[in-house]
Amino acid sequence: MSNKVVVIVLDALRFDVACTHLGFMQHLVEQGKAARYKVKGELPALSRPMYETICTGTPAIEHGVVHNYIARTSKEESIFHLAKAAQKKTAAAAYYWVSELYQKAPFQHFSDRIQLHSDGPIQNGVYYFEDHYPDSHVFADAHYLTQQFAPDLLYIHPMNIDDDGHKFTADSPQYRNRVLASDGLLALSIPSWLEKDYQIIVTADHGMTADGNHGGNTADDREVPLFIISSKVQPGIYEEAVSQLQIAPLICALLEMDKSPKMQTLHLKGVREVE
């Protein structure tokens, strides 16, 4: 049974738009290959706080990254710290805020973009620093990391859905078409990772409103998808909303490593074997 995981965080992907526009992911659900959940995101529904929440399983008031303007390394035990301590290999193709949280801060744009053979929690990383950096390039970076380093934990974080949401709002063809494009990248990528015996998690940090922003307490701000492809999770659609704080212990369970003491006990419906 696999204990390797690819975690894909599609920045600013709303739950309802994921259901209507991620055709490949919904195909996997219909074919009994994936599970789909609705996640109720933590507050504030902002990017950097939710990166930290997803990766550490702690709420913003506890981990202290309560705004995007707080640029420092994490004070918590993240999934990367835990994986490294468990002698697992880690990698990330992600926005530079992920590097600032788990590698070093502040990010130096011309020297920190490519970090290979690092002593930090993310041993091999390729980071971008412009929101319009093409999602296709982020996935290409991720495939490079997979081919070169065969990580046990691969974290992928593209930004174009968020970028188009801010430019055109969530109630726009540009936002919806970007979600369709992201689905295409998933369709091209997931089969190859499954061939390499990876389990797959696809989720988002927060949503996007018809005003072209996020951070508030509406369903458009907070409700995001969670798709899981794993032999340890029963395929199907689970309607009851789950807490975003469940994602970090889920990742730990799929990696077959101990969660941190601060993480919640995993109680996700459909999980078959996690200990």
Image (cartoon, grey):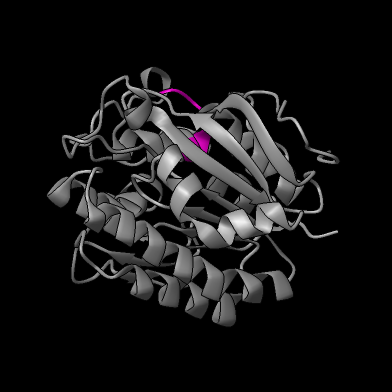
Question: Residue at the location (56% across, 42% down)?
Answer: 226
Residue 42, horizontal then vertical, whole percent? 42, 25
Quadrant (top left, top right, bottom left, bottom right) of the C terminus: top right
Question: Residue at the location (51% across, 77% down)?
Answer: 143
In front of the other: 119 or 123: 123
Q: In this view, does 167 lie to the left or right of 45?
A: left
Q: Is residue 164 left or right of residue 242?
A: left
Question: Residue at the location (54% across, 70% down)?
Answer: 187
Please say if 128 is above or below 44. below
Question: Residue at the location (85% across, 39% down)?
Answer: 272
**The magenta stretch spans residue 58:** yes
Q: Is residue 248 left or right of residue 197?
A: left
Q: Is residue 1 left or right of residue 29?
A: right
| Residue 31 visible within the image | yes
In front of the other: 177 or 58: 177
In front of the other: 264 or 210: 210
Residue 238, horizontal then vertical, whole percent? 67, 33
Number of callouts: 0
Stretch of the chain drawn in magenta: 54-59
Please say if 17 is above or below 114. above
| Residue 93 visible within the image | no
Quadrant (top left, top right, bottom left, bottom right) of the N terminus: bottom right
Please say if 68 is above or below 195. above
Residue 83, horizontal then vertical, whole percent? 63, 51
Residue 96, horizontal then vertical, whole percent? 29, 56
Please say if 36 is above or below 118. above
**The magenta stretch spans residue 195:** no
